[in-house]
Amino acid sequence: MMVQGREDDVYALMLFGTVERPIPSYLHLKRECFVLSSVTKLPAERFDGRKLYRKKEDGQLHITKSGKALFKNFLETHSNEPEVIHCITTVIMVRELYDTMSAEEISYLESR
């Protein structure tokens, strides 16, 4: 289960790797990827996005060991690119905002 397509793999990787806590739900992941794709531009990497995270019993999405390794490799490869540095800052802001919202609050925002 991935967000929308291959282009969102990198956004999901940034969301999971940059902030070390689970993402509350799949809806949060989808909306956070959408917001990031609207405000940042990242390199299109090719990897299996399904290996990034696992859904736990509580419904939260947790990064996997292979996801952590992908994120580390991505940073090593792209850390000198200003777009990546900008995206890391943006990811932190997006996660801080969206992770505190309920699914109902996110749905309300989408309806506006």
Image: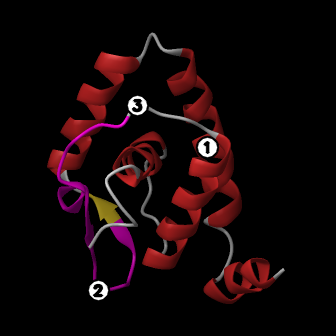
Q: Residues within 10 Å of mark 3 (few under 14, many from 20)?
A: few
Q: Provide residue 111's location: percent of width, then percent of height.
A: 77, 85
Q: Amino acid at mark 2?
A: Glu
Which numbered circle lies on residue 92? 1
Residue corresponding to mark 3:
43
State the CA–CA distance, disc 3 to disc 1: 19 Å
Residue furthest out toward the top: 80
Main secondary structure type of the part rendered in magenta:
loop
Q: Secondary structure at mark 1?
A: helix
Q: Is residue 7 above or below residue 88?
A: below
Q: Secondary structure at mark 2?
A: loop
Q: Provide residue 14's location: percent of width, then percent of height.
A: 43, 43
State the CA–CA distance, disc 2 to disc 3: 33 Å
Q: Is residue 25 visible?
A: no
Which numbered circle lies on residue 41? none
Please report the bounds of the magenta region as a residue range: 44-61
Image check: 4 left or right of 96?
Answer: left
Q: Is residue 93 above or below residue 99?
A: above
Residue contact between numbered discs 2 and 3, judged by CB atoms under 8 Å = no
Image check: 93 left or right of 41?
Answer: right
